[in-house]
């Protein structure tokens, strides 16, 4: 069983829809949770960064963490064609990459297409 | 502009011909890492470096070498490439005590 599970999609939605992307994980040591967005033929870029449980909002994006269920979500409101990309969840124990853990553990990514 | 620069972007080579993919970052980051990305397998760490002269194996290090002689550079070396190393490769860096990774644009490698 993978440490992080993510539905690969593809997920196709109409413009303006609310999108929900999810990951589950098994390692209870994870404390930091991230969402990366990856456009075709590009490197992943950090989209959202949260610590422990709770919600964080940034514009049309909301990241939600439920540590008791080992479940994280990314919500995109009023989705736009420019949101079409692959979304990767990533997790890490505390201490940073030079301290508590030497790597992020990534999900395999969910491919999202927002259609006009 | 703060960035991680990889070269080349695309590379086609033949089995056994040594190659180097360069990676450079201008953000004075301590941590650097190489990943490969394959369909259905996601991002897998090849090697990482906590600082200059400090490198260690990731999850899939076989067939790869790295060096970290300077803080800004972290080249990936394939001494004898094989077709199963055909993949999309990413270099990434992170500042001290941070979990945030900054990625390069990727190198698409094909080994024939």
Image (tube, rainbow, N blue to C red):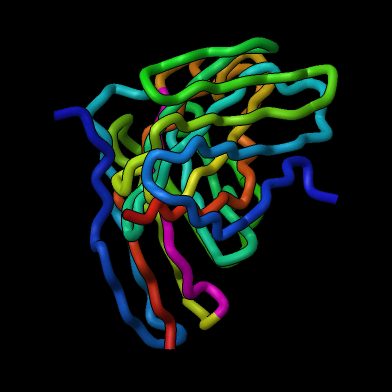
In the image, residue A27 above or below residue B21: above
Residue stretch rendered in magenta on the structure: B84-94
| Residue at image point 44% right, 30% down | A77
**Would residue B68 be found to the left or right of residue B86 on screen?**
left
Q: Is residue A9 above or below residue A83?
A: below
Residue depicted at x 43% and y 35%: B32
Give the residue displayed 45% in from the left and 70% down from the top.
Answer: B79
Q: Is residue B7 above or below residue A27?
A: below
Magenta stretch, main secondary structure, is strand
The image position of residue B18, as x and y in percent, is 38, 74
Query: B18 or A93, which lies in front?
Result: A93
| Count of numbered marks | 0
The image position of residue B105, as x and y in percent, is 30, 50
Task: Please state the horizontal and vertical placement of residue B27, each as a whole percent of the image.
Answer: 26, 24
Q: Judge whether residue B68 can be spotted in this image.
A: no
* Residue in the picture at 38% in, 81% down: B17
| The furthest residue to the left | B1
Say above or below: B27 vs A12.
Answer: above
Q: Position of residue A16 (x, y in %)?
A: 39, 39
Q: Is residue B56 left or right of residue B54?
A: right
Check the picture and name the quadrant holding the C terminus of chain A.
Answer: bottom left
Q: Is residue B85 within the magenta segment?
A: yes
Drawn side of residue B16 relative to residue A29, left or right: left
């Amino acid at each position: 069983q993978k440490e992080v599970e993510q539905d690969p999609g593809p997920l196709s939605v109409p413009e303006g829809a609310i999108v929900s992307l999810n990951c589950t994980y098994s390692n209870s040591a994870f404390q930091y949770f991230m969402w990366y967005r990856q456009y075709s033929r590009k490197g992943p870029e950090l989209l959202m960064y949260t610590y422990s449980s709770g919600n964080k909002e940034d514009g049309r994006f909301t990241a939600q963490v439920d540590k008791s269920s080992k479940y994280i979500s990314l919500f995109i409101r009023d989705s736009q064609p420019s949101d079409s990309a692959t979304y990767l969840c990533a997790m890490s124990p505390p201490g940073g990459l030079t301290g508590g853990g030497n790597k992020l553990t990534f999900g395999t990514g969910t491919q999202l297409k927002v259609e006009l | 502009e703060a960035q991680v620069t990889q070269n080349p972007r695309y590379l086609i080579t033949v089995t056994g011909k040594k190659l180097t993919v360069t990676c450079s970052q201008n953000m004075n980051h301590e941590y650097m890492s190489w990943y490969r990305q394959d369909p259905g397998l996601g991002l897998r760490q090849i090697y990482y470096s906590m600082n200059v002269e400090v490198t260690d194996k990731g999850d899939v290090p076989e067939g790869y070498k790295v060096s970290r002689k300077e803080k800004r550079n972290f080249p990936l070396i394939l001494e004898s490439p094989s077709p199963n190393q055909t993949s999309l490769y990413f270099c990434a860096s992170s500042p001290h005590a941070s979990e945030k990774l900054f990625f390069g644009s990727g190198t698409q490698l094909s080994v024939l």
